[in-house]
Image (cartoon, coloured by chain):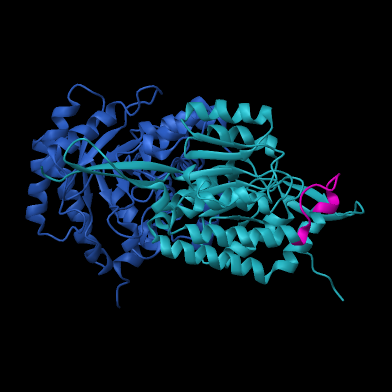
Amino acid sequence: MIQRPALLRLLDEVGTVDAVGVEERAAKFATRSIKRESKRFGLRLAASMVDLTTLEGKDTPGKVASLCRKALRAHDTVEVPPVAAVCVYPTMVRAAVGALAGSSVRVASVATAFPSGQAPIKSRLAEVKAAVADGADEIDMVIQRGAFLAGDLVRVRDEIERVRDACGEATLKVILETGELETYDNIRAASFLAMRVLRPGDFIKTSTGKTSANATLANHQVMIEAIRDHYLASGTEIAMKPAGGIRNAKEALHFLVAVKETLGDAWLNNRRYRFGASSLLNDLVRQLVKQETGAYQAPWNFTENAGGY
Amino acid sequence: MLTITKTPKCYVGGKFIRSESGAVYPVHDASGGFLANIPSCSRKDLRNAVEAAAKAGPGWAARSPYNRAQILYRLGEMLESRADEMAAALACGEQRASAGSGPGAADEVRASIGRIVHFAGWADKYEQVLGSVNPVASPHFNFTVTEPMGIVAVLAPEEAPLLALLTLILPAITSGNAVVALASESRPDAAILLGEILAVSDLPGGVVNLLTGSREGLIDTFATHEHLRAVTASATRAEATTLQQGAAESVKRVVLHDPATDWLAADHESPWPIRDFVEAKTVWHPIGA
């Protein structure tokens, strides 16, 4: 007898995704009317959940230090909570640790040959260990999408496990890169594959932000429903991090609505939920200032690119 | 025969939109019969229009002056080809107005086309008039060039709903600014049709955004929106005060016109209105002793 492929066996176990239903549900989240007090609350909450990210080849210690200052205090007149973490490449971890010493802001580092994950496991593990040794509190790893799509689920799971062990005390975030997984079923299967080896408080994360397909409400919905189902089945609380493409406050609020209505209040804090973003914080602050002053704000007061039209 | 009535829509970001809130206000024909529901734009619609203008503006400003001239001239051609339809829309609004205010419909269309062509001509010439080479007492080549300010708000008067609207918009876009304009509230017919004409004029979507709705409800937001760099309006005393106070916080340029302005007058056709919406940049270039 021919055995069913591993992916299908996993889906037999955890159930498949109703694609039309998920998209319809996700579209509904964008229709909620959030005003005044609840909007201010949402904006501040979202700011406290940001993993302020810079992942560019041209990053320098100076640039990272300035990002860290922004992470601690995003605006000089309006009260904005510090962000959750600063997310950098492994070589920049030391710079970030130095700039954030003594604060509540954590240092996250991408590792494991980000963003492709296409490097020997040995060097990926070495990268994780080096980042942790330099003082990273959190590690963002990518899974081997190639291995996953080829059906080699055991290898993907084992690698997550080995990276988890290499992290030691550090929190692990597993990037599924949903844009490359092609179907909702694959996203659900990959979520479970990761969650089954993760510790409580570890994250699953949508994307690297380095591909054209980024976090969407529908992909996000598939993942948070997987987190909910996993929690109900095992009692393990896995955290969530959408990343890539979330640039304005309105979108961020839509994601928070989805979390509130799917996972509940217990996930509405920065230990259970994060936004991976570089420019989102600018818009959150811009909207907070609008709420305070009543006047719509020009973008150039809130970005590094002050030249704006 | 079945008559099909047109749904009036605003032209924002190159698209025809309804108000974000779905709100409308009715306009009537001369005999008091229902004519159409006009979108009543909200503050959010204004905000969205500003975002659309911010997207389109840099590309428009980067076009060569010669190309801007061609596109404005084409706008004139497009209005010309629908002159009768526009005159009918204007006449419709005119009958609604209490007194016979403003120029006659046909005259207004003709003057509007003339004004478009006039500013099309200035697009590659105003720089020669507004820029300068400045004498300085040091070995520098010192010259001043102009740059567009950014996004300009336009509050059109109730009268001359086409000619006045264009007279306020044209000087701003000639130099590469983008515009968010609020049309005549009681006579929006011409602005609705102008949107359709702008859409086929080669003017990039978002360079001119036309809103309809309550002037009283929107004027505060026009005044305080920090992303708007200038506002030009035909305004009463009270409205002028609102605009100036709101503009002070955002350091916005305010250009006011008397509500009694004769929009047909020839003095609207000059390069000076273009100067109202440019910033001067002066460059000191060392030239050796």
Which sits in the foreground, B238 or A263?
A: B238
Q: Residue A235: tell me if it is visible.
A: no
Give the colour of chain A: blue
Q: Is residue A107 left or right of residue A256?
A: left
Report the side of A171 relative to A223 (left or right): left
B130 and B235: which is toward the camera: B130
Q: How many marks?
A: 0
The quarter of the rendered structure image containing the N terminus of chain A is bottom left
Picture coordinates of residue A70, whole percent (x, y): 28, 31
Q: Does residue B189 appear to the left or right of A251 in the view shown?
A: right
Which is more toward the observer, A72 or A178?
Answer: A72
Chain identifier, colour cyan:
B
On the image, the x and y values in percent for residue B246 come to 55, 28
Q: As displayed, is residue B83 above or below residue A22? A: below
Secondary structure mostly taken by the magenta-highlighted segment of the chain? loop
Any magenta on residue B105? yes
Q: In the image shown, does B170 or B136 lie closer to the viewer?
A: B136
User: Which image quarter: residue B86?
Assistant: bottom right
Q: Position of residue B15 (x, y in %)?
A: 57, 59
Range of the magenta residues?
B94-106
Is B189 displayed left or right of A110 in the figure?
Answer: right
Q: Is residue A291 visible?
A: yes
Q: Residue B56's spot in the image, x, y percent?
A: 45, 55
Most distant residue in the right direction: B31
Query: Is residue A92 covered in magenta?
Result: no
Q: Is residue A305 above or below residue A145?
A: above
Q: Is residue A75 above or below residue A234?
A: above
Give the residue at x 30% y 56%: A177
The correct choice, above or below, for A201 with respect to B55 in the image is above
